[in-house]
Structures are given as structure tokens and as C-alpha cells.
Amino acid sequence: MIDLPWKPDPDYHRLLNALRRRGDPSRIVLLELFADPEIMGTILEEPPAPTKKIKDRETHNRWIDQKIQFWYRLGYDAIWHGPNLTWSGLLPLEAGDSAANLGESVPG
């Protein structure tokens, strides 16, 4: 990884305190909506994990790990992932596919 000239100091409590208007912040909360995969790969000095149609757990975990490492290394206080709790691209069902075709069991 690239040696950055600062020590990361992320703290999600800064974000929570700012949102709740509690106390006087020690600094501005660092939060970003997204980063281009090429920039992430450059900072981490490794190829970015694919983000479209992730079909296996290993790639999914690599993508999450890279995302966490990237935002941590830059000192961001939190990671934005969107308004829902699903992971984009994880085992998407194409037209005509079913969970059974992907080796998943469907509770019934």
C-alpha cells in the first residue's frame, strides 16, 4: 500500500455526534459517497475487485475488504454504502434464474 503522510484516525462517533448535534466536533467529519475503483486500486496498490455481478463469496469479501481498507487508510470516519442493507451485485438473479440454480435453498 502507498505510504501516506498521515496516520488514519477514523471514528464513526464523530459522524453520530454531528448527526445528533452533540458537542463540539474536534474536526470536520470525513464521509464520501463513492470512490472510483481505479483510485481505490492505486491507493491500495492492488487491482480493484470487480463490483458488477459478484457471483462468489471470495470476490464479495475481497470487495468489502478493499472498501474498508481504502476508506480507513484515508482516515474517513464512516463508509457510505447506500440506503439499504443489501450488497450490490451479490448473486443477482437473471431472468429465468432461480435461487435453486445458484445452489441456494429457498425456505418454503
Image (tube, grey):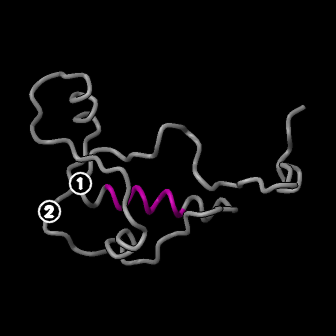
The circle drawn on residue 75 is: 1
Q: Looking at the rendering, which quadrant does residue 90 occupy?
A: bottom right
The circle drawn on residue 105 is: none
Q: In the rendered picture of this protein, how many numbered marks are placed on residues? A: 2
Q: Residues within 10 Å of mark 1 (few under 14, many from 20)?
A: some
Residue at horizontal 77 percent and vertical 53 percent from the top: 93
- Residue range of the region highlighted in magenta in the rendering: 62-71
Q: Amino acid at mark 1?
A: Gly
Q: Position of residue 26 (x, y in %)?
A: 9, 37
Q: Position of residue 67 (x, y in %)?
A: 42, 58
Element at badge 2?
Answer: loop
In the rendered view, does 92 fall on the left or right side of 45?
right
Q: CA distance from mark 1 to mark 2?
A: 9 Å
Above or below 92: residue 23? above
Residue at horizontal 43 percent and vertical 68 percent from the top: 37
Q: Amino acid at mark 2?
A: Trp
